[in-house]
Image (tube, rainbow, N blue to C red):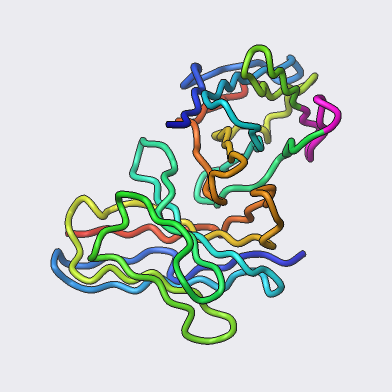
Amino acid sequence: AQSVTQPDIHITVSEGASLELRCNYSYGATPYLFWYVQSPGQGLQLLLKYFSGDTLVQGIKGFEAEFKRSQSSFNLRKPSVHWSDAAEYFCAVGFTGGGNKLTFGTGTQLKVEL
Amino acid sequence: EPEVTQTPSHQVTQMGQEVILRCVPISNHLYFYWYRQILGQKVEFLVSFYNNEISEKSEIFDDQFSVERPDGSNFTLKIRSTKLEDSAMYFCASSEARPHGSDTQYFGPGTRLTVL
């Protein structure tokens, strides 16, 4: 069965520092990859997605992610973190032939120190 | 910008009671979903709904759950006899129903269900 792993449960970075959140998936078919962000008391907001083509995708709020098929990874990056980026980040994967359901990782809680 | 809305934002109920969670998907979307997130755990898929029928459901979605599109705008999740372990945040999502699974799902803000 497909699975998604986000190895970092909590990450703390200083404002202005760079950020990388890791996501690995396990499945043999072509994946569709998403990153969502959840601020406290809020729903899940889509940051970016990868379906095909250029493996480096740009999203909202200055985030980007790179799909590496050889590593089964889709890591999220931001060159300079802002205090407002503090939230929980979820990687999610859909698969060709897997219907339309998404499989989510356990999430990474990001704390930003001023 | 169109968005998915959910009501109520918080529902408290007694064990064994029926609850109905409501969602208004984005208007031109054709695929609808329910997910849930138990506190401290990952977001889990419950069910997808397309063309007025369930498209896919998870093992969690047993006989005590049902979904319905009662009119042209609402999409509901009913839990017939709530259990303590049903306490969770329930998210509704919708998508355009693009082919080959390359659909982007847009999520609502969630309904926090507390079963006492």
Please check the rendered image and state whether residue A55 is part of the magenta-colored stretch, yes or no: yes
Residue placed furthest toward the right: A54
> Number of numbered discs present?
0
Q: Position of residue A41 (x, y in %)?
A: 50, 50
The image quarter containing residue B25 is bottom right
In the image, residue A49 sits, relative to residue A72, either above or below, namely below
Which quadrant does the N terminus of chain A fall into? top left
**Could you say which is closer to the camera, residue B29 or residue A100?**
A100
Point 57% across, 37% down: residue: A92
Which quadrant does the C terminus of chain A fall into? top right
Q: Position of residue B32 (x, y in %)?
A: 55, 64
Q: In this view, does B10 lie to the left or right of B17?
A: right
The image quarter containing residue A73 is top right
Please check the rendered image and state whether residue B114 is part of the magenta-colored stretch, yes or no: no
The image quarter containing residue A34 is top right
Q: Where is residue A20 in the image (x, y as percent from the top left)?
A: 67, 17
Q: Where is residue A97 in the image (x, y as percent from the top left)?
A: 57, 44
In the image, residue B50 sits, relative to residue B106, either above or below, namely below
**Could you say which is closer to the camera, residue A76 or residue A39?**
A76
Point 59% across, 64% down: residue: B31
Segment tinted magenta in the rendering = A53-64
Q: In this view, does B62 lie to the left or right of B16?
A: right
**Could you say which is closer to the camera, residue B69 or residue A65?**
B69
Residue placed furthest toward the left: B16
Point 71% across, 57% down: residue: B98
In the image, residue B4 sits, relative to residue A44, either above or below, namely below
Q: Is residue A50 left or right of residue B41?
A: right
In the image, residue A48 sits, relative to residue B63, either above or below, namely above
Point 36% across, 36% down: residue: B40
